[in-house]
Image (spheres, coloured by chain):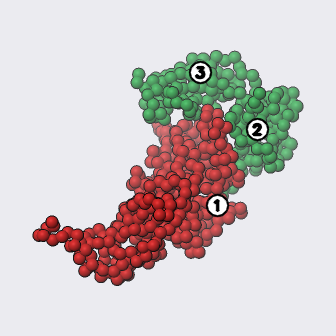
Amino acid sequence: MGVFGLDATASRRSIFSEASGGTVQVAGVEVVQAIQNLAHDVRLIAQKRTVVRIYVKPNGLSRNVRVRAEIAISSTRGGPEKYIVSRNIVSLRSSDHPDLEAQRRDEDQSLNIELPLQQVGALHVRVKRIIPVAMGDDVPISNPDNAIEVNFEAAPPLRIRVVGLRYTDNRLNPPVSFAPDALHFDLLRSYLTRTYPVPELEWSQIVVPIGSNVEPPFSDGTPNDPLWQTLAARVLLRLQLIRQADVNAGRDPRTHYYGLIADDSGFFRGRATQVAASPDPATVAMGPAGRSGFSWDDDGSYADWYGAHELGHTLGCRHPGHCNQDRDPLSSFPYENGRISDAAEGCVGFDTGDPDLGLPMRALPHPDNSDFMTYCENQWVSRHTYDEIFDRLHLEDAQFAPANV
Amino acid sequence: MSKTCIQAVGIFNRADNSGQFVAVQPAKESYVPQQRPESALKVSVETEDGRRLAEIPVTPDFGSCDDVVDEGTFQTFFELPEGTKVLRLMHDGQELAVFSTSPPGAAAESFGLGLRRGHSVPLTQTGSADPNATYTLQAREKGGSLWQTLDIGLDRPDAGQVDLNQFPHADAIEVRVLKSTGFDTEEVDRTEIDFSE
């Protein structure tokens, strides 16, 4: 018996029906890992962190209602279902509810549900319930037959060893040694996990001396910068030698090596030995690490997107040619201004975030975000680069598998 | 008998067509291409008396990021023909640099462990060094399978330092030094560091 003899269930029903009424239409369901469109043209990677975004259109509500969504997922149509509730709450507005595209552009306007890691194969997703947070019944779904089917495919991991290169600044009295802070390793690892089309990273890291023939300053300030050229060449060769010594000792020959250099004594501009035109995990790269001065980059380090760019070169990604960048003549990058998509393709980027580092989920609309192979601001991954890296990692995985695999 | 593969790396400057070998070391699990693009830069593989056993076209790398780079790098992998003693870096028929190997010297390499300074343990001299060789310092968690390279290209077996912080989960580590003459590598000494002591 409820309070004062009222039936609690009946009470909730009446409050919803009297105050709200109306229905909700499921306007779209998008299963996203880094970037996606409503047609699900971007491949989904098995065992990669995945979010289902639900877009709704309320009809006939008499007042705003704050709701969660519950989805049913199954690997076969009509098979056993698992129910999962959205992690966020959205207010269904009785008037002027944001339209579909406005919801896609704003992570707080979609109902976001994180999936358990998925196996290779099909996944059926159906929005089952729209649940008011306060009292009352579910908001009826006007199109309950809203199921979509997506497919998850296998992808190899990115095997990467990040080598922090410790140097000594002999210009200081007494001389001081610098190595990248742990934060830069962590944020690079997280960014690669979030933006690359991989289920996971096979990650390892170490800090070693940069070599006796490399010390600050790292640039002579001239346009051609012969000092930087010489020092960069020395660092890259050292990485190649360390990599081969490690491979000789049993490390997987598909492992990419990336050198990380703290910017305490000045910015050491990054470089890969080459844009690897064909699969070649022996191509190495290096780049600086420090706190970002860009207002759009507020996570505490630029080593993350900078590293994604340089490693992209080792995986065959070329410069699209935007924001004071020369276009690589062999680039096939398709989007104007270096953006991550265009209106025709209709992709929206989505950062699934990283709770361990306090990074929230974020929607990344294509007009405001640029591919990390450009020199533009607000860097994320485009579908084009996502596909390029996916294809290259598959080729490397097969072509360079160690003899005992 | 399996063939030895070699990694040769170096510098090539296209402004003045100068170049040099930086290091040569044996390479396991390396990818040796069956076909290589033609290049003016080549490594001539020769016997001690100058007989050419192979000629390897080498494509220098000039970076990735809009750089107007003259000073590039090269890295090439190839199978070492039997009898190889000399590598010549050639550009358009002009010799830029020579790498030659001698039989390993009779040095009695070894190293000791110095006093720990913070998280670093320096190696100390207890033996001699081979002037024709370079040394690589590696360590691994005791009982682990994967050696990690801590330093490379050292001119003495005792020139490196062991950074204990690179093994935060270990109770003890193994440390070893490899000696390389370019075409051969061998372990010359090994010890352990017990963190509980």
- Residue highlighted by disc 2: B78
Image coordinates for residue A238, horizontal then vertical, percent: 63, 39
Q: How many marks?
A: 3
Name the kind of residue labelled 2 in the image: Phe
* Residue found at x 47% / y 54%: A117
Residue type at mark 3: give it. Asp
Give the amino acid type for the residue marked by disc 1 in the picture: His
- Same subunit under labels 2 and 3? yes
Q: CA distance from mark 3 to mark 1?
A: 47 Å
Q: Say which colour chain A has.
A: red
Question: Which residue, given by chain and number where applicable, does mark 1 sit on?
Answer: A319
Q: Chain of mark 2?
A: B
A349 or A329: which is nearer to us?
Answer: A349
Of marks 1 and 2, the one in the foreground: 2
Taking A186 as reference, is A321 left or right? right
Report the chain holding disc 3. Answer: B
What color was chain B assigned in the picture? green
Q: Kindly give the residue lying farthest to the left in the view shown.
A: A4
Q: Residues within 10 Å of mark 2 (few under 14, many from 20)?
A: many
Q: Which residue is mark 3?
A: B189
